[in-house]
Image (cartoon, rainbow, N blue to C red):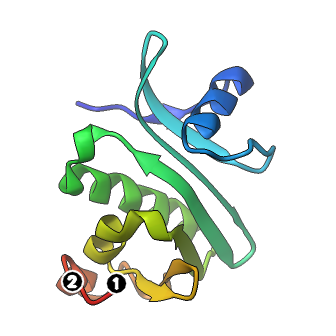
Amino acid sequence: MIEIRKVEDPAIAKKICATHGIDYQENHRVIATLEGENILHSAVFSYKNSEGNIYGIDGFEGDILLLDGLCRAILNIMDIQGVKVVYLPLKYKKLASYVGFSKDDDHYKLNLEGFFSCSCSSKKGRDDQ
């Protein structure tokens, strides 16, 4: 079983942010699977009030099904916290399409309201995002 946990060590969190090309900030939530010093899977995200951002997400050797699962876990955390809209950088086109994000100017956008109670899986794999 793959276990991805919250990164508590600020030095490791900063290292993960750097691998994603992100400047570490106190409000970032960093999760990862670590094997010694190696970062196997990771994600950096934040949320405040009704907006959330996934800044970086990778691992699983690019396996879209596993990345989809990690992304949905993050979306679930945000949904529970009352987030209504989530943004994802344009470099994650394949993941955005698979999960159901829509292209919106300089990022992808997902309306979380009702996302987990609808048949959101019908959007999976669409390339028209």
Of 8 and 15, the residue lying toward us: 15
**Residue 126 relative to residue 55: left or right:** left
Label 1 secondary element: loop
Where residue 89 sits in the image (x, y, percent)? 52, 67
Which residue is at a point 36% across and 70% down the rendered structure image?
93
Which residue is at a point 18% across and 86% down the rendered structure image?
122
Residue indicated by mark 1: 117
Where residue 28 sits in the image (x, y, percent)? 70, 48
Which residue is at a point 35% across and 31% down the rendered structure image?
3
- In front: mark 1 or mark 2? 2
Label 2 secondary element: loop
Say whether disc 1 or disc 2 marks the residue closer to the N-terminus.
Answer: 1
Of 113 and 70, the residue lying toward us: 70
| Quadrant of residue 68 within the rendered picture | bottom left
Residue kind at label 2, given as amino acid type: Arg
Where residue 127 sits in the image (x, y, percent)? 23, 83
Residue indicated by mark 2: 126
User: Against 98, is 24 above or below?
Assistant: above
User: Against 115, is 46 above or below?
Assistant: above
Q: Quadrant of the N terminus?
A: top left
Which residue is at a point 28% across and 83% down the rendered structure image?
120
**Distance (Cα) linking label 1 and label 2:** 19 Å
Instruction: Point out the residue furthest to the right here.
Output: 26
